[in-house]
Amino acid sequence: MIITLLDKEIDRLPEIASREGGSSLLTGMLDENSAHFDGLSIEETDWFRGHIYAAIALSGAPGDSLKRAREDLRTSSSPHILAGIARVLRSIKAGAEWCNDVEAAQRRIQFSDQYPDFRFDPPPSPCCGARTSLQELDAALAAMRSTGCSGHMPAIDDAAEFLGVSPAAFYSAVLEDQDGKHATFERLTVEKPMLLAFFYTRCMNPLKCSLTVSRLARCAQAEPRLGYVVMSYDPEYDTPHRLRVYGEDRGIPFSADVRLVRSLRDWGEIKGVLELRAGYGAATINSHAREVFLLASDKRLWRIPPDWLLDAAKIVDFCLEVEAL
């Protein structure tokens, strides 16, 4: 059997899990922009991330990963990732408050189920057979239902994160919108705070980019006191024409305050300031988070939970609270 570099990386995970603070180290390894994902295919990335979750379940404090696990449970269609998360939920004795998300995940992979084949699992035996990803989720559900609503899930923080004051180079980065017009973040935030979300048109996960753009479109239709910009992770591929078609298909009400954009020459600066969680394989993005930011006209910057896009009034209330509106 040929052992690859990826196999060797995965074989290190149980040792990391056994260290003091191993859960936190492993949770940090889930970041989509981590160097160990560079150049991997989407399938390799999902396999690696599934192993990281399975290793977290072996650690002494898997609760560190719950915010990340909840997001991936709600958005991932990878049998490997979902099987790893199922193990995490069993290890923390999660309660019935997780059941709906687990059942939704099962429906997503009902026709793509497979054995996760985690490398550090013992060989199957007559008494301990291998489980498919659906069976891992079934086992998690059974444990949750026996626990009831009194699981040991720590509170998951859904607060905005203040990222500080952005450097001038970030606000002057040159953008191109769906009509081929140029703009900068500085010009776009002169009169009102701006929501900035990220996507790319080649994304195949309808629960990530497509859902984010559709939700932002509804916010833009409901709340004119904010500006709205959706920016591509894939600026070389996402030409103005592709941006316009993608936005129109998802109800974006294009205007001077509502745009889809790409970076023309300052993509590295933008990625660095925002610490964007997107990984790149040989051809395209291999994994990414849902990411939404609030930019104030005085250059203050916050990362906000992506599900805030479900409630534009909540975002406005936050803007009033921090005096950004």
Image (spheres, helix red, strand yellow):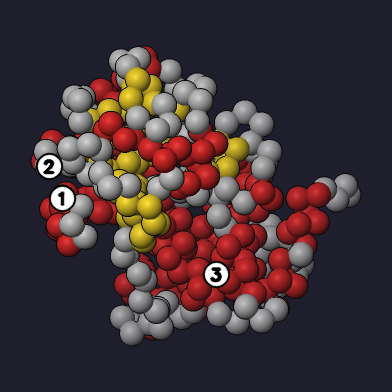
Residue at image point 50% right, 49% down:
275
* Image disc number at residue 153: none
Q: Pick whichever of labels 2 and 1 is earlier in the sequence.
A: 2
Q: Pick whichever of labels 3 and 1 is earlier in the sequence.
A: 3
Disc 2 from disc 1: Cα separation? 8 Å
- Residue 201 place in picture, x, y as percent: 42, 28
Disc 3 from disc 2: Cα separation? 44 Å
Q: Specify the amino acid type for callout 2.
A: Arg
Q: Secondary structure at mark 3?
A: helix
Question: Which residue in the structure is indicated by mark 3?
Answer: 87
Are discs 3 and 2 less than 8 Å apart at CB? no
**294 relative to 312 in the view: left or right:** right
Given this view, does label 2 or label 1 mark the residue nearer the observer?
A: 1
Residue at image point 15% right, 50% down:
325
- Image-quadrant location for residue 243: top left
* Image disc number at residue 325: 1
Disc 3 from disc 1: Cα separation? 43 Å
Given this view, does label 3 or label 1 mark the residue nearer the observer?
A: 1
Q: Secondary structure at mark 2?
A: loop
* Count of all numbered marks drawn on residues in the image: 3
